[in-house]
Amino acid sequence: MSNLEASTGNWRFGSEAFPDTGRIGAWRDAVNRIGLTSTVTDVEVGLTGTIACQTSPLGVLFAQMASGAQQFVRRPSRGDDGILIVKHVDGAVTLKEGIKTTTLNSGDMVVACGAGFTLDFSTSFRQLVVRVPRLVINTRLMSLQTSKVLHLSGRKGFGLVFSQLLDAVMRTIDTLDSTELRSIDIALSEFLISSLVEDPGRVEGNGPTSMQTAMLQRLCQKIESHLTDPDLSLTQIAKEESLSPRYLQKLFQSGGESFTSYVRHRRLERCRLDLQNSQLASMSISDVAFRWGFNDAGHFSRAFKEQFGVTPREYRQDNPQPYDEAEPHHVNRGWPQEAIVHKRQRAAVFPDADPDRSGSRLDALFDKSSKHHHLQANENTVHWGYFSKALPAVLQINSGDKVTIEAVTQHGNDDRERMIDGDEGMERIYRWTPTSKNIDRRGAGPVDASVYGRGSGEGFGVHILTGPIAVKDAKPGDVLEVRILDVLARPSANPKHAGCCFGSNAATWWGFHYEDLLTEPKPREVVTIYQFDLKQDRPTAKAIYNYRWTPQVDPFGVVHSKMDYPGVPVDHQTIEKNMNVLKDISIPLRPHFGVIGVAPRETDLVDSVPPSYSGGNIDNWRVGKGSTIFLPVAVPDALLSIGDPHASQGDSEICGTAIECSLTGVFQIILHKRGELEDKPFADLTYPLIETPDEWVLLGFSHPNYLAELGEQAQSNVYEQSSLDLALKDAFRKMRRFLMTVHKLSEDEAISLISVAVDFGVTQVANGNWGIHAILRKELFDKARL
C-alpha cells in the first residue's frame, strides 16, 4: 500500500503539538503523508509548520501547508499513487527537475504523474498540495504516462482557470456535500487530462481517442451510481447505454483495465473511505463491504488486502478517524478582499506615522538610566487597533526593568462624561473634530477608508495599545517574561464624578449571542455602564444604566448604524437610558489586561483582534495582578504592547466585550535568551503561557499561528474558519507537550493526567481566533514544584 493511499481522511498537523526535540521528525512524517519528503534536519530547530487536509468522498486529498525554508522532494514512482499537484501560494521557491531549474510565481502549479522533482524554498512559504488517486481519474488516463514534470503558469489562460478552481475548492470544501464534491472530482480530473495531453510528447501508447474518452467518462459516472448494487454487471451497463458488451469491454481495455477490475477497485476505494469515517465507526466491516456491492465478506477481505496491503480490520485500526469539526460561528469582521488589494497597492505602511515618534519629544519622559519607567498614555505613546514590527518603539528598556504602563479603554466614548472628560491623556487620544483626529489610524485597514468608508484603518482592529516597548537585546527565539506586579483602576477626572471609576460592557454585533436573541427588537446592540466600588475588601462593580445603540454620526459626518468603528462619540441625546438595571447584583472585579503581546513576524500590519502565538488579544481574566505571561519573541527588540484593560470578564466573553475600563499596571519585564532556556518550563515555548501562583494556564487557539496558516487573507479568513473543536485540540496538544517535556511524563501518563486533573475552559469566542485554555494545578507536582 502506498503512503498516499494510506493517508486519507480530514486531519490537521501543527508543530505546536510536539516538543522541540521531536518536532522535525513529526513534521517529516506529516509531509510524507501527503506524498512529499522534507529534507529539513533536526539541526534546524525552531521550525514551525501547519498542514490542514480535506479529502473528498472519492479520495482526492487537498492539503494546505505553511512552514519555514526547506526542501521538498517528490520521489519518482510508477504513477500508481496517482497524480500530485502542487500549487505555489507565496514564498521564494525554485522547482528543480534534474538539472533544470525554474522559479515559481504565486499561483503556478507543478503537476507530476510518476516523475520526481524538488521544491527548494528559501523563505517561509504556503502551498496547496492536491493528490488525485489513480482510480478517481478513471480509465481516461490509464495509458497516459509522463516522463517529465509539468509546470503550469497560474497567471494566464488555462493555468489561471485551473489555479482559480483550486482556490475555490479550498475556500468551500467544508460546505460542499458529497454530490457536489463528486462534481468537483470530475472537474478536477478533466483539468488534469487537458493539462497532461496538451503536450503530445507526454502521451505514449495507444490510449483512447477523444470520443472514447468522453464515452468512458459517461460510463464511469454511470458505474459510480450503481456501485451499491451487488448485481452490477457489464451487460447491465451496456444495455442502459445502448452499447454492445463487447464494445464496452474494449473501451475499458483501451485504458489498460477491464470492466470487472475497475468496478472492484472503485468499490474497494469506497470501502476504504468508509472504514475511516468516524460516523460509521459502529458499522461492522462486513456491513461496509455489503454496503458497496460485495456479497462475500471473505472475498472482500482478500481483495482489500491485495489492493491496499493490509486487511480491512488492520486498516481501520491503523488509520485515525477523520476529524469532524463543529460548524464555526461565522462573524464577518475581517478584511474584505478590497481592503487586501488596496493594502497591497500602498507603498507606505504608515503614511500617517510620525517618523520621530520615538525621538526627542519622548526623551524627556524617561530617565534612560532608571530601572523603573513610567509610560503615560497619550497620542504619542499609543497605537490604535494593530500590531506592527515596523512601528517605532516609544520606550527602550533593559531586561529586569520595571515599567508603570497606563492602558486605556477603546470604549471611553460609550460614556464620555464619566470616562474621558477632564482626563488629559484620554482627551488627547480621543480628540476628533470635523477636520482632524489626533490618532487617525484606527485599525489595520487602509488609511483612506476605501472599503467601507468608516474611517482610517476601517476599524479592522479596535484596541488602544500602549507601546511598543523595545527590550534591549531581544531576538527571535528568546522568551519574554512579563510579570504583573500591580493593577490600579484609572479614576474619572471629571469633578462631577471625582474618586469614581467606571467601565462599559457592550453586547455587540460580533458577540456570540447576537443571532440568538429572544426578545424584540432584533437584532440590537446594548451598552451597560458600570461603576466600581473599590472601598470594600473585595472590590465589585454595579451597573448604573444601559442603552441601545442608535445610529451615531461621527465628527467627519459618517453614520455608524452599528458599533463598527472604535472611538465613535455617542450622543447621549439620541439614546434612552434604562436605569436600575441588574439591581442588587454586585460583580466581583477581576482586573486584568485583555491584550499583552509582542509584534508578529509574518507581516507589517496585524489586526489587534485575533490572538496568536505572539500573544495579543488573549482575553483571559487570569492575566492580572500576581500572574506572569511568557511570550515567544518573534522580531528584534520584541516590541511589547499592552492594552484592552478589563475590570471583569467571564470565561468566553460571550457578548463580545468584558467590563471595558482604563487601568494602570506595574510590570517587570525579563528577557530569557534562547541559549539559556534549558530546564525552564518555558524552554520550548511557541505560544503564550500564563503562570499564576497556583497554576499553569496554557492557551489554545483555533489556529495557533493563523497568519502563517491562512496566508494573505488570514486576517479575514480567521473569522470564518475558527471553532472550539480546533481550539480544544490545540490546547490538549500543548498540555500534552508541556507534561511530556517539562514533567518528563510518557504520553500515556500525560493523557491520563489531563483527563482526570486538567481543567479546560472557553477563554473567548469574541476574537475571531477562538480560545480554549487548559489549567494545570501546580500542587499535582508538590514533590518537584517548579
Image (cartoon, helix red, strand yellow):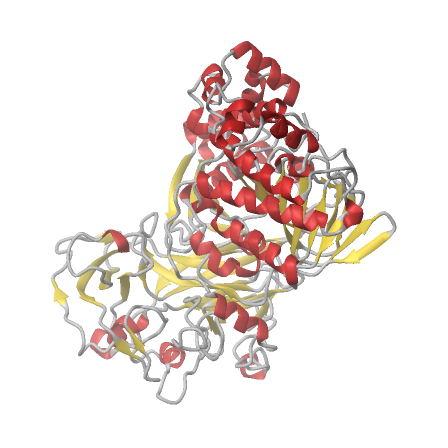
Residue 349, by quadrant, is bottom right
Residue 430, by quadrant, is bottom left
Residue found at the far right of this picture: 99
Residue found at the far bottom of this picture: 435
Of the 4 image quadrants, the one containing the N terminus is: top right
Judge by depth and name the residue closer to the eye, 190 or 697: 190
Regarding residue 273, the answer to whether it shows in the image is: no
- Relative vertical location of residue 366 with respect to residue 106 in this rendering, above or below: below
Judge by depth and name the residue closer to the eye, 256 or 46: 256
Regarding residue 704, the answer to whether it shows in the image is: yes
State how many labels appear: 0
Residue 395, by quadrant, is bottom right
- Where does the image place residue 598, in percent across and percent down from the top left? 55, 60
- Left or right of residue 705, residue 82 in this image: right
- Left or right of residue 95, residue 387 in this image: left
Q: Residue, x 42% and y 44% (percent of image)?
A: 772
- Relative vertical location of residue 756 with respect to residue 184 in this rendering, above or below: above
Judge by depth and name the residue closer to the eye, 757 or 707: 707
- Left or right of residue 323, residue 299 in this image: right
- Where does the image place residue 14, in percent across and percent down from the top left? 58, 42
Judge by depth and name the residue closer to the eye, 96 or 376: 96
Q: Residue, x 41% and y 87% (percent of image)?
A: 436
- Relative vertical location of residue 472 with respect to residue 219 in this rendering, above or below: below
- Where does the image place residue 441, in percent across and percent down from the top left? 46, 76
Of the 4 image quadrants, the one containing the C terminus is: top right
- Where does the image place residue 56, in percent across and percent down from the top left? 52, 39
- Relative vertical location of residue 544 with respect to residue 778 in this rendering, above or below: below
